[in-house]
Each structure stands twice: as C-alpha cells, then as structure tokens.
Amino acid sequence: MENRPLEYDYTVAKWFMFASIALGIVGMVIGVFIAFELAFPSLNLVLGQGLAEYTNFSRLRPLHTDAVAFGFTLSGIFATWYYVGQRVLKVSMAESKFLMFIGKLHFFLYIIGVTAVVISLFMGVTTSKEYAEFEWPIDIAIVIVWVLWGISLFGLIGIRREKSLYISVWYYIAAFLGVAMLYLFNNMEVPTYFASGGIGAWYHSVSAYAGTNDAAVQWWYGHNAVAFVFTVPIIAMIYYFLPKESGQAIYSYKLSLLSFWGLMFVYLWAGGHHLLFSTVPDWIQTMGSVFSVILILPSWGSAINMLLTLKGEWQQVASSPMIKFLLLASTFYMFSTLEGPVQAVKSVNAIAHFTDWIPGHVHDGTLGWVAFMIIASTLHMTPRIFKREIYSKSLLTAQFWIQTLGIVFYFTSMWIAGITQGMMWRSHDEYGNLAYSFMDTVNVLHPYYTLRGIGGLLFVVGVFMWAYNIIKSASARPVEESELHSASPMGA
Amino acid sequence: MFHWLEKHPFLFAVGVFLTIAFAGLVTLLPSFAQTSRPIIGTKPYSTLELAGRHVYIKNSCNACHSQLVRPFKAETDRYGHYSLSGEYAYDRPFLWGSKRTGPDLMRVGNYRTTEWHENHMMNPAAIVPNSIMPGYAWMFKNLADIDTAYAEQLTVAGVFGVPYNKAVPMKDGSSEVVKMGKTVEEARALALAEAKVVAADMKNQDVKDMVAQGKIPEIVAIIAYLNSLK
C-alpha cells in the first residue's frame, strides 16, 4: 500500500476547466462583436431598436473585459491550481472530505457569482470602475468565493507530504493575497439604501473615495489586478507545465527567487503610470514611471528562465505544438513587459494614453501570454485527467498558427491606430490651430478597427478548435492504461 | 533563508503580504487628505444631475469618453482648461475613463446645448457625420431613478459631509446653495422642477409630455448632468 502511487482527484480541476472554456467563448465572442461594432456601428442595432440597450457597445464592453478576466482567466487559474496543487504538494484532494467539499462549494458559488455578474452588467448595474464594476452584493459574494479558494489553497498546503513549496505554489499564494488586498480596498463603498434609511435601489452604493483619491486607488487596483490575475498565477502555470511538458528541469532556482521577490516588491508601485499628466500628485506619477521600467528586470527574469529551460531541447519547438504554445507565451510575456514600460515613459505616454495602443498592449499580453498559457495548461491536463491522449495534434498545430496570426493582426493594427490618433490629436497647423477635428481622427481608424476585428475573429476560431479538441479528447478516444507520467508523447 | 521560508507557508505568506502591501502604504496614504478638497466654484451635484450621472454610469459612457483634460496645448485648445484636482471633490466614483474613442467630456457643458444633446443621443451620426457612437433611444423612454440619486445625496451629505443646503463659494465672489430635499417627496419635486427647465429646451414631444405628467425620462437627467460639466 505504501508504495502505490497517489491517485489524484481532478473533479474540481475538470469543472473549472470546462468553465474556463465556456466563459472564454462567451467573453471572446462578445469581444469580437464589439470590435466590429467600432468598425461598423450599425451592428449596435443588430437585434433591432427594442434590444439595442443590450447589444450596445457600451453595455457589452465591461461584459467582455470581466468575462475574459474573471471568467476565462480566473477559472483557468483555479483549474490549474486544483491540478498542480495536489501534484506538487504530493497529496490528493480525495484524502480530505473537507477540502473536497470546499473545492466543490468554491466552484458552485463561483458559477453563481459569474451568473450574477453577467445579469447585472446587462442591466447596467455597475460602479463604473474598470474590472471592479460589481455592486456591493456581488462584491460580498466574490469575497466569499475568494475565501473558499484560500481555504482550499492553505488547507491543501496544511496536509502536504512534500514539505518544501514548489515555485508555482509561491505564485498561487501571492495571487491569493494580492487580489484579496486589492479587491477589498478598491471596493470600499457605502450602500446608499441603508445609509439613507431605505430609499432607492437596494443594490446601489457610493464609493468611499472621491475624485483624485478614487482614481489613485482604482489604478493601484486596476494595474495590480493585471499583476495578480494576468501575471502572477500565469507564471505559476508556466513554472509547472513547461518543465513537465518538455521533460526539462527549471534552468535556475536563483533566477526564480530573484524574479519572484522582485516582482512582488516592484509591481505594486507601477499603478501610477495609468495616471500620468492627471491630477494625482506628480511624485506618484513619477514613481509609477520609474518602477514600470524597473519592472522589466523581474519580468524578464522569469521569461528568460523559461526560455533557458528549453536549452538543448529546441527541436521540441518544431515537433510539439504544446511547446510552441509555451514558448510563444513566454516570448509574448517578454514582449508585453517591454512594451508596457515603454508606454509608461512620460513622453511616450503623452501620445499613447487614451488611444488604441493601450488595448493593443493589453491584448498582446492577454492573448499571447495569458490565453496561450491557459490553453497549453488545459491541453497538458486533459490527457492526465481523462487518461486519453489529445484528440488531434494537427488540429492543435493549426490552432496555434491561426491564433498567432490573429494576435499579430490585433497588435499591429492597434499600434498603428494608436500612434496615428495620438499624433493627430496633438498636431497644430502653421497658424497654431488644431490641425484635425476629432472626427478626422476617428475616420482614419476604420481600416485598423476592421483589421483588429479580423484578428480577434481568428483568435476565436482557435478557441473553438481548442474546445473541440478537448471535448473530443474527453469523449472519443480509447482510455489509456494508466496516467501519463513523463512528458507528453507529443514531444517525442 | 529562502529555503527555510519555503518550508514555512505561513511565514512565507506573511513575507509576501508585507512586500506587496508596502507600495500601497507609501503611495496612497499620505496624499489622501490634501487632494479631495474642492476648489472655489466646485459645487455638489443636484438630485437630477446625480440621477443623470447614474445614467451615464449605467451605460458605461466612461468606456469611450474621458473626463480628464491633460495639461497640453492640444488638449486645452480642444477641451478647455486642464483639469484641477479639486474639481473632482464631489465625484464618487471618479469618471476619468481610460480610452478616448470619443472626445473628452470634462467641460462639455461649455460648448454643447440641450438641443444638441437631444438630437445627438437619439442618432449621433445624424449630427456628426460618420460618428461611430451608437444611439441611445431607450433613454427617451426609461425613467430616471430619482430616489436612488436622493439616497446617494443623503449618504454623501451624512457620511462624507458634502455641503448640500449650504452656501458654496463661486468664482465671481457670490455663493450658491445646492438644495437637497428633506423628504423623498420634496427631492422628487426639486428634480421635477429642474427637469422642466431642461425639457423646455427640448423638441421631442413625448419627452415634454412625460415631464408635464411628472415623469422624468433618463434623457432629461443625463442632459442635466452633461450641462453641469463645466
């Protein structure tokens, strides 16, 4: 009995994986739709005037961002935690009835929370703060879901066999603590119904901070939500899945130490770069700029550690679509962590801020890094969860190239659009008058908006291929004798 | 030390938390008291304006329009005086936005009229050729939520000391009082009186009829809000 390998229980991981696929499709289809609305505004009325309120760009935009950030990404993070956590701590969920119950409760409350978010955003119930649009009842639900994840996380750590925490676990712990701190402080709000003695809508609240303070707190949150949702837990994934998939050990432990603690310290200062030339104090703005540039060090530290992990094994990039995803993800991580600091330099920001270059930057990070990592992670997990090989390797390779092309379309068109518009806004003619009306700067964007929509569409096609491949793997192929232990046969 | 820390999850978590909390403590706390003071000429929102602000938020206008004029010649030429911190003292939440798909609205009340907004909100492309902004026809039918706006006024007056029913200094040396109802009925009456002023400048007969019957459509509230942005 003692020598029998552990049987891990992937029930909760599996559920979150399917949630991630479903919410990814929802969020990204909405994203493509609103991208085309900007190119072809008549799409705002696609379901007629009666339903225009719900097909309108402005209602759908927060739905898109929240569905991909807190639907697709977060459930992807949870799915990998419930998979990776057991394996690196050498303990099975099945060993604790309590943790199994908490894990399942975590999933169900999460789904209820997501449903409430979708309904409320369609209704226009929002606080307007980006990535924190939810009113106080949903905020409370989110806190409960987060605490449940915390119990799962620390509960599993509490009963672990492997005493030393693997690098991925550091990052999951940091993601848990970071989001908890940021979310609580940014969502300090007073419910007006109770404060006024029962007048008006019960769900409405007013921010505890006013004006400039509110902006400073919001972008401390907004920037670091990117840190602790789109960066930290995604690094947790790559530290586990890249070595597993390639069969290579992590290149340098010391580099991972430096990158982890460096990232933890530096990231939180950089929020001020969202507020350059605004009314927040100058020194906060300057700190934001300076620390954004310093942030290149820990970011590239992780990325270089990943690339060097493949040292001597570069032939895997050609032979394995999985390694392609993982390699390009770390490359996009390097790329967007260089682009971000460039945009945070004050003189560049003067042109880039408020333009399409910003969504361009967001998307090369989220599509190229976050989505690629989640896709690669779920594809590594699928054969082990279902004990079946991936349905089609050639479909996976095709998906890789289609999505990569989509991302290239997206960020190149948004670079050109952003810099063009930024330069047009600020140009004066020889008499010192503004050279262009605002509409001139909108008209010029049409081809780029169209191209961006096509890029997004290509990416979504890839997402459907991903979903199809996983569903087919889970249902159509014969069961393997035992769980796959080493690198995927794909890599061989 | 790090090896040791990796075997002690609790202390590891404490270490991480202290490391990430540090920047927030240093950058956010010290400036809080200074930056939220109103400048002369900044007054709280009236009940109808606040209801209009809620319509603005409900439809995520801030997803495409900023309310932040940066101190560059091109921006002050286009939008007016650059923004000052105190001007936002009564903005809960702030609505600076992060993307200008459409123009800045920080001082839109200085150069657009009620009638312009009325036509533009119904069909933007009819007023601004090639505009990619969608129409907001439902605002002409849906009613503004005056009660919630009043609840918010009571809240900010009670909790944050926003000066309703008090003299607020204006730029020309005079002072103004922004009235807030003592009861919800009084608040509704104040909002309706304001709505009648806005509706008088509008052409849409349905809207005029609704206001005459004592109902306030969202379009009236949001125009009152947009006109207050100066």
Image (spheres, rainbow, N blue to C red):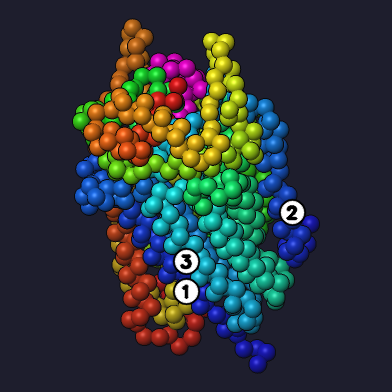
Relative to B13, B73 lies left or right: left
Q: CA distance from mark 3 to mark 2?
A: 32 Å
| Label 3 secondary element | helix
Q: Is residue A136 above or below residue A207?
A: below
Chain assignment, label 1: A
Instruction: Point out which mark residue A14 bears.
Output: 1
Q: Amino acid at mark 1?
A: Lys
Tell whether position B65 is magenta. Answer: yes
- Residue drawn at x 23%, y 33% as measured from the top left: B205
Tell me if mark 1 has few (under 14), some (14-19) or many (20+) residues whose alpha carbon lies within 10 angstroms of its own.
many
- Dividing the image into 4 quarters, which one contains the C terminus of chain A? bottom left
Question: Which circle's residue, 3 or 1, is located before the other in the chain?
Answer: 1
Q: Residue furthest bottom?
A: A1
Marks 1 and 2 share the same chain? no
Q: Is residue A269 left or right of residue A359?
A: right
Query: From the viewer's perspective, is the residue at label 3 or at label 1 nearer?
Result: 3
Magenta residue span: B61-83
Hey, what amino acid is under mark 3?
Ile
Image coordinates for residue B148, horizontal then vertical, percent: 49, 44
SS at circle 1: helix
